[in-house]
Amino acid sequence: MVSVFLESLGSLIISIISHAGYFGVTLLMAIESACIPLPSEIIMPFSGYLVLLGRFNLFAVGVAGALGCNLGSLVAYYIGSLGGRPLVEKYGRWLLVTHHDLEMADRFFARYGDWAVFFARLLPVIRTFIAFPAGVSRMSQVRFQFYTFLGSLPWCLALAYAGMKLGQRWMSLRDYFHRFDALLGVVIVICAVWFVQNRWKNRLRAA
């Protein structure tokens, strides 16, 4: 069932890029960066394959992808800033998130947000969702956009370049990244379980 869905999604991505060109790349990468997990591991390598066929320019397609990341991240940032933060402030205790946690996140993004956003943009899965917590912490919009583009450009260029070099075998990148995604997902689940257990123990001690 999952493989059928991925095949259909891949066909849709290929169709959009084939018909809409650079705009299609920008649109799809914007969707991927708006907290909607559309796989950039298909979008950019296929675009790189089209570079090999002479339809795209490598640098131009990388810039188109990075600009899409900025546009989509802007949506996720404002959702976090205007909607997510008030919800966390009001209902965070039900999610085991305290006001102190929010203050720590604010200080973290104020001090390390530049590099956090930059390096997050180079990691699968995490890159899709980093804009939301940056928005919740209300990181400087100018800094956020600058480091989003700075981190997204090498990611987009690297995937496009790999697709160009692999040629008709560009789809093999998808399987490689899916294995990496699974490993990263396990790490995230372990961290989430540790967080919940730690907070629950603290609440029991306080009670």
Image (cartoon, helix red, strand yellow):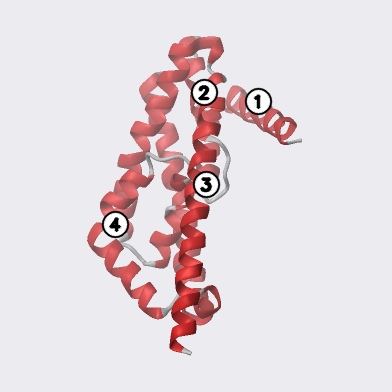
Residue farthest toward the left in the current orientation of the protein: 111
The residue tagged 2 is 173
The spot of residue 111 in percent (x, y) is: 23, 62
129 or 101, which is in the foreground? 101
Whole-angstrom CA distance, mark 2 to mark 4, is: 30 Å
Question: Do tag 2 and tag 4 residues touch (Cβ < 8 Å)?
Answer: no
Q: Position of residue 20 (x, y in %)?
A: 58, 28
Circle 3 is placed at which residue position?
A: 186
Kindly report the distance in space between the C-alpha atoms of the residues bearing marks 3 and 2: 20 Å
Residue 187, relative to residue 192: is it above or below? above
Q: Which residue is mark 4?
A: 113
Q: Is residue 207 above or below residue 33?
A: below
How far across and down, in percent of the image, does residue 164 sit?
45, 15
Q: CA distance from mark 1 to mark 4?
A: 36 Å
Amino acid under disc 3: Val
| Within-10-Å neighbours for mark 3: few <14, some 14–19, many 20+ | few
Q: Is residue 125 above or below residue 134?
A: above
Quarter of the rendering containing residue 172: top right
Type of the residue with mark 4: Gly
Q: Compared to 153, does 134 lie above or below?
A: below
Rate crowding at label 1 as few (under 14), some (14 to 19) or many (20 or more) other CA atoms within 10 Å.
few
Q: Residue furthest right?
A: 1
Identified by mark 1, the residue type is: Ser
Q: Nearer the viewer, mark 2 or mark 4?
A: 2
Mark 1 lies on residue? 15
